[in-house]
Amino acid sequence: MPNTAIPETLIALLHGPDSPGIVARTCGWIFENGGNILHADQHRDAATDVFIQRIEWQPAAGHDPLDEAARFRRHATSIGLCVRIARTTDRPKVAVLVSKQGHAYHDLMLRWASGELPCDICFTASNHTTWENAAREHYRVPFHHIPVTPSTKPAAEANLLSLIDQYGIQLLVMARYMQILSEDFLQKCPAPVINIHHSFLPAFVGAKPYHQAYTRGVKLIGATAHYATPILDDGPIIHQAVAPINHRHNVEDLIRLGQDLEKQVLAQSVRWHLQNRILAYGKKTVVFD
């Protein structure tokens, strides 16, 4: 029978100052080393003169992917580019944070359990015990209850950082985790953090955005997934979606419609991150399709 195994490929996300011939210098290196480029896309941010590129390629037969990734990284650095390289066989280790509202959490976990998300969810952590049984019994992942009060917040964050280190977490997802991660935590956290915010940022930051939207009489509500930064709800935006509303909708309608958006936006953002399609630079992201 023919071998139907999908070959391992490498994905490079690059950015740096634009210069003539830069595409030839990145893609040319792969060609000269016998690689086969499967996908390549690039963009120039005209306002900042930043070159941005995503390349996926299959190394030549007999080439060790780890060695090739290291050699390409040295080449990209030598021509002034920042680079992140991943292997398509990688399964990043992920942790999910949740509070009492479980719609985004359950949607994400069910997608993962069905094989839709190429990762290993290593644990759930929460400041409440609401979803402990679901995590342990249904999704079969460890659950860590980490209560948070103003006086215990530093200790709670230190506990979470210890778990992240213990499990080797490579992505942290806030699935409606209703705690603000401190600047100290975000500086120490070795993994990027994706948060889902229940509004179309930059409008209605902070608490109760649906109530804020209702009070303002807006005609669209939205949800925004972004990378968390020390400034609340100000990190690079990954994905957004909106739904139309009108004067007949009350706050409960806005919450119901918004929660559907939150689930879709968070799942898509996590999927793109796991597929190495997001390049964040400054306060922006480029998402390669």
Image: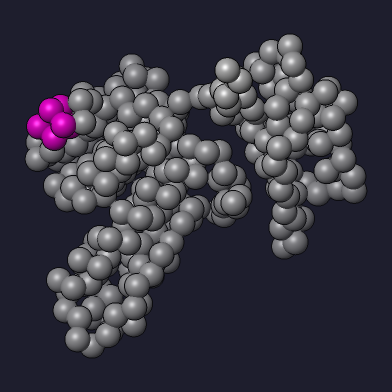
The answer to whether any part of residue 172 appears in the image is no
Which quadrant does the N terminus fall into? Answer: top right
Q: Residue furthest right?
A: 20
Q: Looking at the picture, how far across and down is residue 207, in whole percent?
A: 24, 61
For residue 100, side relative to residue 87 (left or right)? left
Quarter of the view holding residue 3: top right
Any part of residue 104 in sight = yes
Q: Answer with left or right where residue 145 lies relative to residue 214.
A: left
**Region rendered in magenta:** 132-138
Q: Main secondary structure of the magenta part?
A: helix
75 relative to 24, above or below = above
Q: Would residue 135 be counted in the magenta stretch? A: yes
Q: Is residue 213 above or below residue 184?
A: below
Closer to the camera in the image, 64 or 158 = 64
Which residue appears at 70% of the width and 27% of the height? Answer: 58
> Residue 250 placed where, x, y %?
16, 79
